[in-house]
Image (cartoon, rainbow, N blue to C red):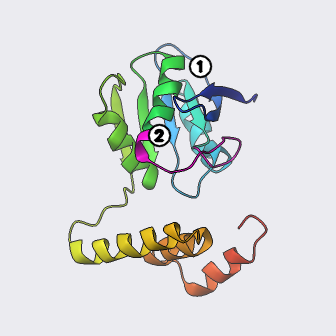
């Protein structure tokens, strides 16, 4: 598989690969916060047996570039650039925070998204105050440039045991 690239509205280069083929618009796989396209490739390959698939690295992951400050609107622009390349009518599959991004993209004017699939979206509507406190802690860590601590907070809130998080922090990819 060869890596292709598209340039987003702010000049950020987004890396992607095409899998499968077939007629019609593709399915774009939108991974979660800690995913790059290598992690979503098994899913993309399974989907590619039935349709064309675009498997991409969200900004700041894998072979895609990044620009500060972060904004969801920039990630929607990244999807817009991919969809401009592939043509209208694509479907979006989002996992975890990628599901939240898919919702934002589906609501954006002019993207021409045909269908969306949301897998494990990161919303907890029953514990609004807890979610608000989590968001405040996360924003504070990110404002301080403590990205590793922000990821640790995210993983702990998702239920990953402290021992597993410690193992991940010691891994070279951290």
Looking at this view, is 125 or 50 the one in front?
125
Looking at this view, is 129 or 36 the one in front?
129
Q: Which residue is mark 1?
A: 21
Looking at this view, is 35 or 25 the one in front?
35
Q: Is residue 13 magenta?
A: no
Q: Residue at x 45, y 27 (%)?
A: 80
Residue 67 point in image, percent of width and height: 59, 45
Start and end of the magenta stretch? Answer: 59-75
Asked if 31 appears above or below 12 in the picture, the reply is below
**Residue most extreme to the bottom:** 163
Q: Determine which quarter of the picture holds residue 49.
A: top right
Q: Residue at x 46, y 19 (%)?
A: 25
- Local crowd at mark 2 within 10 Å, few (<14), some, or many (≥20)? some
Q: Is residue 172 left or right of residue 156?
A: right
Q: Residue at x 66, y 82 (%)?
A: 166
Q: Determine which quarter of the picture holds residue 7.
A: top right
Residue 78 point in image, percent of width and height: 51, 34
- Local crowd at mark 1 within 10 Å, few (<14), some, or many (≥20)? some
Residue 158 point in image, percent of width and height: 45, 72
Asked if 37 appears above or below 162 in the picture, the reply is above
Q: Which residue is mark 2?
A: 74
Quadrant in which the N terminus is drawn: top right
Q: Is residue 67 magenta?
A: yes
Asked if 145 appears above or below 22 in the picture, the reply is below
Count of marks placed on residues: 2
Residue 33 point in image, percent of width and height: 52, 56
Asked if 126 appears above or below 53 in the picture, the reply is below
**Residue most extreme to the right:** 172
């Amino acid at each position: 598989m060869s890596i292709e690239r598209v340039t987003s509205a702010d000049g950020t280069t987004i890396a992607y690969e095409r899998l499968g083929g077939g007629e019609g618009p593709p399915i774009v796989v939108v991974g979660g916060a800690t995913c790059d396209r290598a992690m979503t490739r098994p899913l993309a390959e399974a989907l590619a047996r039935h349709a064309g698939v675009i498997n991409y690295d969200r900004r700041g992951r894998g072979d895609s570039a990044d620009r500060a400050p972060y904004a969801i609107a920039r990630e929607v622009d990244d999807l817009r650039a991919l969809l401009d390349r592939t043509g209208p009518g694509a479907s979006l599959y989002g996992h975890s925070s990628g599901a939240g991004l898919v919702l934002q993209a589906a609501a954006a004017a002019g993207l021409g998204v045909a269908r969306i699939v949301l897998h494990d979206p990161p919303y907890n509507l029953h514990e609004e105050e807890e979610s608000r406190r989590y968001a405040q802690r996360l924003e504070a860590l990110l404002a301080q440039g403590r990205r590793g601590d922000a990821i640790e907070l995210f993983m702990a809130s998702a239920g990953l045991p402290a021992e597993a998080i410690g193992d991940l922090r010691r891994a070279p990819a951290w």
